[in-house]
Every structure is written in structure tokens, then in C-alpha cells.
Image: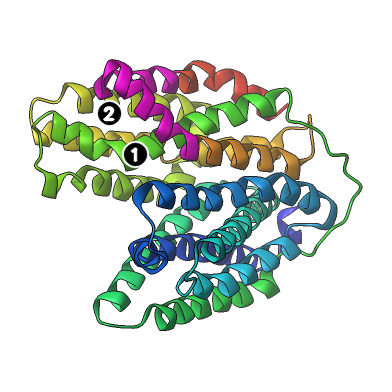
Amino acid sequence: MSPLSIPAGARLATRLAFLAAGFAMACWAPLVPLAKARVGTDDGQLGLILLCLGIGSILAMPLTGFLSARWGSKPMILAGGAALALLLPLLSVAGQVPTLAAALLGFGAALGTIDVAMNVHAVEVERGAGQPLMSGFHAMFSVGGFLGSGGMTLLLSTGTAPLVATLLSAGLVLAAVLLAQPGLLPARGEPTPLVAPHGIVLLLAALAAICFLVEGAILDWSALLVIGAGLADTAQGGFGYMVFSIAMTVGRLTGDRIVARFGNRRILACGGAGAILGLALLLMAPTAAVATAGFLLIGLGASNIVPVLFRLAGSQTVMPVGLAVAALTTTGYAGILAGPAGIGFVAHAVGLPTAFWLLALLMAFVPLLAGRIARAGHA
């Protein structure tokens, strides 16, 4: 696909898809306490209900990759976005455990659908444009997350009824998808065999799982880590994750220019090394300021690794692009869902700091394999 074959609005359409997906997903987080009170469940039961979100996503992702390869990503983006807008209000009124579980299963499937399809579309747009764009697309997902969680929290805190708040949010999601629709690349059907990930795709998927595992660990366990080390009190425990999130968003907003200048291999090598250094600083920090510098380095280092992995999945030739992108997305979700629980088991056995050192050891595979996967991804 040549740059001239990319419609003028294709980049904007892709950014809108990422923005809508991040926005919709983040809108759910402030609704969790309300949902728990409404269905009258305890923490253990709530945890099982919340698993439905991840199960729905993981079930939908491989199928979406297959259908995107056959029909194109456009219809899948539209279907996933419309389903998100339809199901989000239901999450605010579901009053029984089975209803809430079913709504989360559907909402997760919609997220998984748009997540895979928009990444497939991003690969096509970037390849047609002939320049790095993936980091900027992923940055819009992070921006959507900030807007979604912040907007929903603001509406609820000002007394807006949950149903009204979710209807307004769903309207914004639907508007973004409809605005994106004219610029999305036309659907192109082609016969595609359903094959399991193999070759370089399997390696890319494993590295994506490691990166998502680190991100999930920072989200779920970093506050306990710094509090346990005496570097912050309970009220300030979440500050580190905020620094990490801002650093990752800034890194992705500037990432396309950096990748264009230094190339995929250097970004993987330097980004992975930076994340490892950040984890080491965090674990050996004598003061809160050093720990904050660690969070900053982890966010900046990790910010462009996953976009580069998706770019390489789009340029490899061992399997169809749609299935390759689905493999990365599915393993990434598995890492971010199952990883924090695994870290909990490790932390129980050997301590939370040791569990984080193991994360640094896993992250070392990224710079160690940077040259190999960068070459193989372009083969």
C-alpha cells in the first residue's frame, strides 16, 4: 500500500478509534464501587464477576483477528465501538449478579474486538503512510483513559445519576466512532486460514506479555511496594503510578519521531534497558524522590516497546497480519490480567521486592532479543 492510497482522514480515524476504546474502558473503573453496592456482593465475589471482563476480551480477540484478516478491520471497529456504547449504560443499572456478569462479558468482548481491529487498522495506516505512527495511536488510548476516568468521576461526584453519566459517555464513544467511520480504510476480504501463532509472532507475543505484565504490576502492586519500603504513606501510595502513566503517555506522544530517528532495534534495546534501570532505582530507592525517578524511567522506557512490537507484527510474513496482531493483543491481556495474581503468589512466597526483581529479569529479554526480532520482523 503506497502513501497515496491512504485516505486523508485515515490517521484521524485511527486516533479516534484508539481514543474511543481507551475512554470507554476507563469509564468502567469509577462505576465498580457502585456496581458492588448495587448487586450486594463481597470482595471475593466481585473479583470473580470482574473476571468476566477479561474473559470476554480474550475470547473475542482471536476471532476478531481472523475476521479482520478476512473482511478488513473497518467493520470490526464499527461493531466493537457500537457495542461499547450500547453496553456501557447497562453496567450502571445491572442489579443482579448474573446480569452484571453478562454485561461485563459482552463489554469485554466489545473491548477485545475494537482493540484488535484498531491495531490491525493502525498497522495498515502506518505501512501505507511510510512513517512511524503507532506510538501516537497508542498515546490516544492513554489520553482516552484519562478523559474517561476523569470525566466519569467528575460527573458522579457532582451528583449525576450513574445511568445519565454512562448515557452521556456512551454518546461520546458513539460520536467518536461515527466521526471515524468515513476515514477508516475500506474493508478488504481475503481468504485467511486460522493458524496458531508461530515463529517470530510467538516471540513478539511473549515480549508483549512481559511488557503488559510490568504495566499491570505497577498498577496493582507499586503502591504497596513503596508503602512497605517506608517511602510513602497510604494516602500517597498511588503517586508513583500517576508519574508512570504520565511518563508513558508523554513517551508515546513523542515516540513516532524518536522511532523514525533511531529505528525499532534501538528503541527496544534502550527502552528495555531504561525500564530495567527504573525498576532497579525503585527497588533500591533510599528516598521517595529516587523512587519517583524510577517510576519515571519505567514509564518512559516501556512507552514505545509495545507499539514497536505491533509494528513488527504488521511487517512480518510468517502469518496473516490480523492473526499476528490478535496474538499480541491476546497474550498482552493475559499478562495484564493473570500477571498481578501471579505476582501476588510470588510475593507471598519470597516477598514483593523479589517479585519486582523477577520482573526486571523478564524485561531483560527485550533488549537481549531486540536485534533478532527487529531483523525477523522485517524479513
Image quadrant assignment for residue 346: top left
Image spot of residue 343 (x, y percent): 38, 28
Q: Main secondary structure of the magenta part?
A: helix
Tell me if residue 1 can be seen.
no
Which one is nearer the viewer's eye here, 138 or 226? 226
Residue at x 49%, y 53% (from the top left corner): 49
Image quadrant assignment for residue 345: top left
Say what amino acid the circle numbered 1 marks. Answer: Leu
Magenta residues (range):
336-364
> Mark 1, residues whose alpha carbon is within 10 Å: few (<14), some, or many (≥20)?
many
Image spot of residue 72 (x, y percent): 79, 57
Which residue in the rendered view is the most extreme toward the right?
Answer: 191
Asked if residue 340 lies left or right of residue 297, the reply is right
Mark 1 near mark 2, Cβ–Cβ under 8 Å? Answer: yes
Does dot 2 land on a helix, a strand or a loop? helix
Say what amino acid the circle numbered 2 marks. Answer: Gly
Image spot of residue 29 (x, y percent): 38, 60
**Residue corresponding to mark 2:** 278
**Residue corresponding to mark 1:** 300
Q: CA distance from mark 1 to mark 2?
A: 9 Å
Earlier-in-chain disc, 1 versus 2: 2
Which one is nearer the viewer's eye here, 376 or 337? 337
Image quadrant assignment for residue 377: top right
In this view, the mark in front (1 or 2) = 2
Q: Which mark is residue 316?
A: none
Q: Is residue 111 above or below residue 324?
A: below
Asked if residue 153 lies left or right of residue 212, the reply is left
